[in-house]
Image: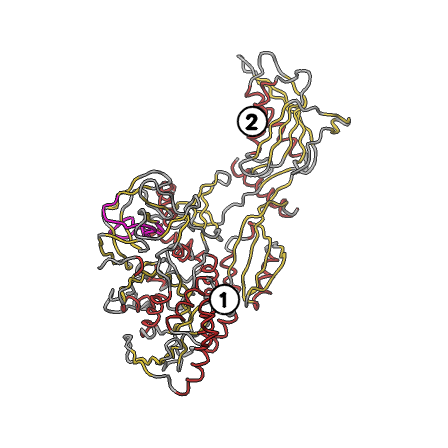
Amino acid sequence: MKSYTTKDIRNVVLLGSSKSGKTTLAEAMLFEGKVIDRRGTVEGKNTVSDNTEFEQTNQKSVYATPLYAEYKGTKINFIDAPGSDDFSGGALSAFKVCEAGVLVLNAQQGVEVGSEIFARYASQYNVPVVIAVNQLDAEKANWDHTRETLGEAFGKKPVICQFPANPGASFDGIIDVLSMKYYKAKDANGAVEVLDIPAQYADQAEELHMELVEKAAEGDDELMEKYFEEMDLSIEEVRRGLTAGMAKGEVMPVFCIAAKNDFGVKALMDFIIDVVPSPLGSIQKTIEGEDVVCTPDGPTSLFIYKTSVEQHLGDVSYFKVMSGTLNEGADLVNPETGNGERLSAIYAVAGAKKEKVSSISAGDIGCVMKLKNGKTDVTLAVAGSEAIEHMKFPDAKYRCAVKASDKNDEAKVGDALNKIAAQDPTITVAYSKELRQTILSGMGEQHINLVKWRVNNEFKLNIEIFAPKVPYRETITKVATAQYRHKKQSGGAGQFGEVHLLVCPYVEGQEAPTTFKIAGKDTVLNMKTSDITDLEWGGKLEFYNCVVGGAIDLGFMPAILKGIKEKMAEGPLTGSYARDIRVYVYDGKMHPVDSKEIAFIIAGRNAFKEAFRNAGPKILEPIYNVDILTPSEYVGPCMSDLNTRRGMIENQEMDGSFTVLHARVPLAELYRYSTVLSSLTGGSATFSMKFADYQPVPGDVQNKLLAEYAAQESDED
């Protein structure tokens, strides 16, 4: 394989809904780039990108597969991204290393919700998009419907560069309004005959050509001036204008293909070479905000956007050279840790095919095996360089608890889950000390099922997945007092400590009150010392020493506070963390010999427990902001379902042809919500969720939780 300079490299990611034909398009591009000499099929389970057992069994992409084609003196790196939102992390990682996306549409469906979701992601990550309308040779292909949905979804951004002559089962002609030529298919291997546009399409082609020229002119002030003067632009000028318009996010060129028969794919690849910018001069930010300019003359720096464990190879790290030239045997360091890595061998990569190369220039994509610390989202660079800004991913949407089926395998299962999470940044694994569960989070139930499959099949371990506990909180709503005496005599040295305390709710922004009714009398408590704690689980504890007359020595106050914190870490109602409480210690007793720290820890803990139970205790539950993007016809079912989940719909708004519902929903009601939403809407809706705050649970829910906790304690006894 020849070495390519930065200006002769193009990096694109293939995006689109499941069944749009991305993998089939990838096969055609590989064929045209001479990487393969025979195109595989998804049905035949012999494609280059869907090459894992899970993908072949399910006939769907779940991993973003890096590929390349050598075409007309240019290396086109392209990443075949999964079409399901559950596996969107692959596309989002690809945005970090690609200068453009190709959004593949199914001509039988038009713009589907998955198409729009990935287009939105591309816009958020400032990645320009080319649209490839695929499957125009399918019996139910509908070009007019597809054009209509393009306008509904993307407004005036789509600009027609090609349109089909006769879409459907006999599709064999494309009118290119950029070159004003007619491409007629000669066979099923990409050969075309270039002809003049047939008379019946001439007027439509001329009209679309003028729209294309005008749209290109809008991308560049100089071109706009020329267009006003001559009312036309050359092909090169149109390409230049489209490049500028795409960079601004104002233009989405539309092409026609039938990837299964390799028809129109060459023209799409030509356009990628001519219009999609090379990585030369592109800029990445470091975590310190400095610019890293993509140039072969700069200091060597690469960014690892993906890692995987592959059969017979072990750990494989996929990277893009962000600056400089990477040579085999290079010694680089991780700027964030200082750990060194030697890249003894580097490879160009097309799926499972790895071709060893001696060097890779800035802007190119490759891989390396068996790095010690080269994980996803890591920079490796020459000493003195800064780390590239980290990738950003949406918050997880699916949360479950996981445990080993065999307790003896717990350590092995934990190790397997951590390895999977290190490869996929959209998977998180964490042991919750509060819940006493290992919590596994991902982008959806399919995503979690893939993790389970990998643990079962790759690591040969069995795990169970089930609904996680909810991290409730406990607090109080009124003032209460309590006292507790701890007295222990066992023949030798005794233990004695007595604590009188008062509790009241902590309210943000409200000064701590000092006057209370204690034992029926108005009492003013004078604060001698205080300890304000921001609790690690959220909320506050304010602790005030108001003891007078030396009833309790100042040296025992930390012990009392320790006892209170211990009880707050295991709340009196359900064992959940307690929060937002003010505690005043106002009296007590000591013994000159038997008073010890342990005695006041116990006395403080038990006095707090009793006071808490008498202070109008309340259970709080985590509330999440949930934003649902759904076709408007499913708004009713979505709202009805939210009502059954105790959800509060705050407002709704239109976003293109979709409706966005903004709601607040208790976390306890969101287990498997992604699956239910998909079922309600035929897979056409998606959502995001983010923690908002804690709110009191309704009375009936609190009673149920208290009963469940009491039953649990009874079983344990």
Q: Which residue, given by chain and number where applicable, does mark 2 sit on?
A: 562
Q: Residue furthest right?
A: 521
- Image-based side of 530 in relation to 237, left or right: right
Residue 434, horizontal then vertical, whole percent = 51, 39
The magenta stretch is 303-330
Residue 129 part of the magenta segment = no
Count of marks, rendered view: 2
Look at the picture and state if 310 lies above or below 713. Answer: below
Pointer 1 local density, CA inside 10 Å: few below 14, some 14–19, many at least 20 = few
Mark toward the start of the polypeptide (2 vs 1): 2
Query: Could you tell me which quadrant the N terminus lies in?
Result: bottom left
Q: Main secondary structure of the magenta part?
A: strand
**Which residue is pictured at 40% across the width and 87% down the height?**
199
Residue 7, horizontal then vertical, whole percent = 31, 59
Q: What is the C-alpha distance between the residues marked 2 and 1? A: 54 Å
Choose top left, top right, bottom left or bottom right for residue 661.
bottom right
Callout 2, which amino acid? Lys
Q: Secondary structure at mark 2?
A: helix
Callout 1, which amino acid? Gly
Choose top left, top right, bottom left or bottom right for residue 645.
bottom right
Q: Which residue, given by chain and number where applicable, does mark 1 sit on?
A: 682
Residue 708 appearing in the image: yes
Closer to us: 338 or 108: 338
Residues under numbered marks 2 and 1 in contact, where contact means CB atoms less than 8 Å apart: no
**Which residue is pictured at 25% across the width and 58% down the height?**
353
**Which residue is pictured at 28% across the width and 63% down the height?**
74
Pointer 2 local density, CA inside 10 Å: few below 14, some 14–19, many at least 20 = some
Residue 47, horizontal then vertical, whole percent = 29, 65
Residue 28, horizontal then vertical, whole percent = 30, 69
Indicate which disc residue 530 carries: none
